[in-house]
Amino acid sequence: MKIYGVQLKAYHLEKMKEFYTNLLQMSLVYEDKNSFAVLAGTTRVHFEKDEEQPYYHVCFHLGSAFFDHIFNKLKKKNLLLSNEEGEISMYWKGKQAYFFDPDGNILEILERPLPHKEQEGWLRVGEIGMPSSNTYDLREYLSSFLENKYKAENDSFSFFGEENGVGVIVKEGRNWYPTNRPASIHPIKLVVSGNTEAHLKHPILPYEFTVRKEWSASLPTVQFRIARPTNHMDKIIEFYGKGLGLKKVGDFQKHEGYEGVMFGLPDSNYHLEFTQHENRNPIPRPPEDQLLVFYIADTFKWSETANRLIDMGYRQVPSENPYWDRGGITIEDPDGYRVVLMNTVGI
């Protein structure tokens, strides 16, 4: 699995932000008074303020040259942890080192091959520790929605996942290598790749998983959004929500002068967003053959949807392309964009 996102709790929020952005040179991509997020290669790592001081195990993959650079920075500040032989430079399928962050999280850097020669810097989060009182039960739970290539040799430690990303499932209380700190359970939210879309919360442990399916190897998209401006937000919400019957999957207000709403097509994986700026800048009228086409095979539901929009006062218009009038009804939304309701099954 690829680990796209990790959300963890943090106590020393400002010190943590300074550590990750300055010392570890991760890009700050978000912050507010209670949280911040950095980008570690392809993984977004989000820390949220907590009143207690939790600690986690996180392993970051990075290329050889950048490993040496970060290793030397950590060594200069005397932050590297030693193993039982007193070594601070280790090896496991690549150069390896451990250190603490300001919250006491046990961090690991692990050298891994870069996919592109010109790439440098952080590659991804490769491991996230997931303690459990029953490791076999947690493995069984994860197996219901994630692929795994690793076997469990015992009930105290095992990997779950594949080379790009693993959960390190350990028995609660087992010491994290190379420290004498026992593994303890704290909230974790993960966004990972998988073969099926899913969003799950573990019934006992404070672990939450969002699984995203990539479209293809050539275009590994996990979500698609069509974004459109409007100056008629209330009417747009009425047209697409009440009239067309789309489900609202998100909204926001007062975001750098914008407000917005998102409707699922049919869910958040593929959705339609409308944004409105507080200045209400003029928006050109769209071409008459720029369409959103909905194929509704059920004739009664097709007729019911079209009549509902017309009864709400929205205008049925002849299509610019006569093809859409054969088996379809075209209706203009409040911005003049055309929606076609086709009574066919599509391609």
Image: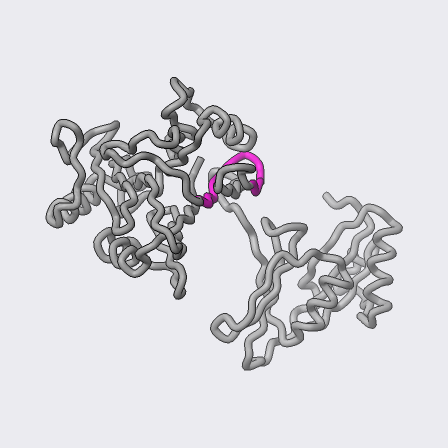
- Specify the quadrant that holds the C terminus: top right
Which of the colour schemes (rainbow, by chain, secondary structure, one colour) is used?
Answer: one colour
The residue shown at (41%, 43%) is 186
**Prevailing secondary structure class for the magenta stretch in the rendered image:** strand
Q: How many marks?
A: 0
Q: Is residue 120 above or below residue 259?
A: above
- The x, y position of residue 35, in whole percent, is 39, 59
What's the magenta region? 188-200
Left or right of 8, for residue 74: left
Q: Is residue 190 magenta?
A: yes
Q: Nearer the viewer, residue 90 or 279?
A: 90
Give the residue displayed 79% in from the left and 62% down from the top: 330
Q: Where residue 85 appears, x then y in whole percent?
A: 13, 27
Q: Residue 295: horizontal and vertical position, in percent?
A: 76, 50
Q: Residue at x 55, y 32 (%)?
A: 145
Q: Say if residue 226 shows up in the picture.
A: yes
